[in-house]
Amino acid sequence: MDLEHALHAARALVIADLASAEVADADVVSLVEEAVTHRRWWVEQWPEGAGFVIGLVAQDVQDSLLERYGRWPLCPVCTESGDPHALDVEPELGTDPHWVCPKTAVSVSAVGKLGAVLGR
């Protein structure tokens, strides 16, 4: 995967997940752009890491959202527990990243496909 393709794919997939959770307003999309800019530098330094960019951008956006707005995306698996928690991206550094419930280890969806699980 070349640099530009990897970055465009990461941007599109993370924005799709944000939109499916109805949180893709301008401020949040700006966080995606910041993450993509940061990861552009990172993958320019390590071109072999282009396949990891999707998961890394998702994690970067998730971290930025936590600092500014709160947890995202909330786990749709553990809705009865009364303890809302965010999904994690797994693998942390690898290809084919998925949103996974950290409490049950259930793979909820691939990054970019969260809307199918949320019914949006």
Image (cartoon, rainbow, N blue to C red):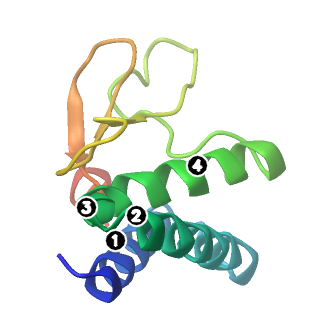
Q: Quadrant of residue 98?
A: top left
Mark 3 or 1, nearer chain start: 1
Q: Residue at x 64, y 39 (%)?
A: 71
Which of discs 3 and 1 lies nearer the camera? The answer is 3
Mark 3 or 4, nearer chain start: 3
| Quarter of the picture holding the C terminus | bottom left
Give amino acid for label 2.
Asp
Give amino acid for label 4.
Gln
Q: What distance separates the C-alpha of mark 2 from that of mark 4? A: 11 Å
Give amino acid for label 3.
Glu
Q: Describe residue 19's horizontal placement relative to residue 64 as left or right.
A: left
Mark 2 or 3, nearer chain start: 2
Image spot of residue 115 (x, y percent): 30, 62
Q: What distance separates the C-alpha of mark 3 from that of mark 4? A: 24 Å
Q: Describe residue 48's horizontal placement relative to residue 70 as left or right.
A: left
Q: Which residue is mark 4?
A: 62
Q: Which residue is mark 1?
A: 13
Q: Is residue 112 above or below residue 83?
A: below
Identify which residue, 117 or 71, lies in the foreground.
71
Q: Which residue is mark 3?
A: 48
